[in-house]
């Protein structure tokens, strides 16, 4: 017979990803956030909801390390089967992932998990060997990892954390992964020159880019001491490079034109210096909050056009910090064989990037 278990009532249910302390329901915002439980049961159901206005939620179910299903999450609270007819004598490790990134443009988007129903018991899950934090843009948000190459609609179904390099890297290293990412955003500006659309501005809050009234708690400072990563992997710069090629954005709130300029085929030196200084300040922020972590700026997959600005920022940071636990790493660039939907890196490209990262992290950690 099935019995209901609330997440707040069972300490063996692990919550992965930045979120608030509330557990009835657990609210997941960042892509790749998850709940995990190991059960001895023949049947398991999850009570879940995916409220949204424009961007529906998708979730993936991993059972004993293999992805078994991926589906749209109903908008209203619903009871969804995870598995049926398992051998109840064997332990079954289950992770349920939020496949879609946090949606800054949808004030009501979230993945809400109310509890589970099962006909057995929940036992402790095995521990991870490492903790990895990924900070990035659409690549880290897994945009384009699902769908045919010709797909161009910007919709949730083409996002899949479990087909992205961050998930693959975590699997290879038995690491718990957290992602802080947003499509179109950069380290300084978005692809279309919005200076307030940058990840560093939101890094020290739980998930402050989700600004719906019902998610006010996510605007609060994040407690970094609660989860210290062994490595922080940053993949930003692709959208900043794009911003240099745009005409600029007039910010009506400030009355100022926000633009990054080109001079011929080169980045304007003054603007590039401004961005590299911002990179250095961001690295200070990352180090302050993660004193024991190795920092990898792992850039590429779509292009390496912004490499010189990133390297300049890293050098500025090193000159003032004397930090030798930081490194720049180039990731494999997408090609006709590895491209996915929306002209973004596909699963093959993400797998190649994960292989490079795994090799590097094995030497570091």
Image (cartoon, rainbow, N blue to C red):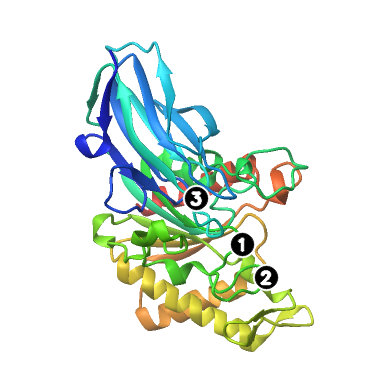
Q: CA distance from mark 2 to mark 3?
A: 23 Å
Q: Is residue 216 placed above or below 123 in the rendered structure?
A: below
Residue 5 in picture, x, y percent from top left:
26, 29
Q: CA distance from mark 3 to mark 1?
A: 18 Å
Q: Is residue 108 placed above or below 251 in the rendered structure?
A: above
- N-terminal label among 2 and 3: 3
- The secondary structure type at the circle numbered 2 is loop
Q: Residue at left 47%, top 37%?
A: 76
Q: Is residue 50 left or right of residue 16?
A: right
Q: Which residue is mark 2?
A: 192
Q: CA distance from mark 1 to mark 2?
A: 8 Å
Q: Which residue is mark 1?
A: 184
Q: From the viewer's perspective, is the residue at label 3 or at label 1 nearer? A: 3
Is label 1 in contact with label 2 (beta carbons under 8 Å)? yes
Q: Nearer the viewer, residue 171 or 9?
A: 9
Residue 134 in picture, x, y percent from top left:
45, 55
Quadrant occupied by the N terminus: top left
């Amino acid at each position: 017979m099935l019995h209901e278990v609330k997440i707040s009532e069972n300490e063996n249910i692990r919550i992965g990803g930045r979120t608030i302390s509330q557990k009835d329901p657990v609210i997941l915002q960042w892509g790749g956030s998850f709940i995990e439980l190991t059960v001895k049961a023949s049947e398991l159901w999850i009570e879940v909801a995916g409220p949204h206005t424009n961007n529906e939620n998708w979730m993936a179910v991993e059972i004993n390390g293999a992805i078994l299903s991926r589906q749209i999450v109903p908008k209203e609270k619903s009871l969804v089967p995870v598995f049926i007819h398992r051998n109840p004598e064997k332990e079954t490790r289950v992770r349920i992932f939020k496949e879609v990134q946090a949606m800054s443009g949808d004030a009501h988007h979230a993945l809400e998990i109310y509890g589970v129903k099962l006909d057995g018991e929940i036992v402790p899950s095995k521990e991870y060997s490492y903790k990895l934090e990924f900070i990035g843009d659409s690549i880290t948000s897994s945009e384009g990892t699902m769908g045919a190459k010709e797909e161009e609609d910007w919709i949730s179904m083409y996002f899949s954390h479990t087909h992205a390099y961050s998930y693959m890297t975590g699997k290879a290293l038995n690491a718990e992964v957290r992602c802080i990412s947003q499509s179109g955003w950069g380290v300084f500006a978005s692809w279309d020159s919005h200076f307030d659309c940058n990840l560093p501005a939101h890094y020290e809050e739980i998930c402050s880019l989700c600004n719906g009234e019902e998610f006010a708690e996510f605007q609060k400072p994040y407690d970094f001491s609660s989860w210290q990563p062994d490595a922080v992997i940053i993949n930003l710069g692709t959208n900043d490079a794009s911003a240099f090629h745009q005409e600029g954005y007039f910010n009506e709130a400030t009355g100022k034109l926000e633009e990054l300029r080109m001079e011929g085929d080169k980045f304007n030196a003054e603007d590039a210096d401004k961005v590299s200084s911002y990179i250095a300040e961001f690295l200070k922020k990352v180090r302050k909050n993660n004193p024991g972590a190795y920092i990898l700026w792992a850039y590429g997959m779509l292009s390496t056009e912004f490499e010189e600005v990133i390297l300049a920022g890293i050098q500025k940071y090193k000159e003032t910090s004397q930090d030798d636990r930081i490194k720049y790493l180039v990731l494999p660039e997408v090609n006709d064989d590895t491209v996915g939907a929306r002209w973004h890196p596909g699963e093959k490209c993400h797998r190649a990037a994960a292989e490079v990262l795994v090799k590097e992290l094995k030497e570091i950690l």
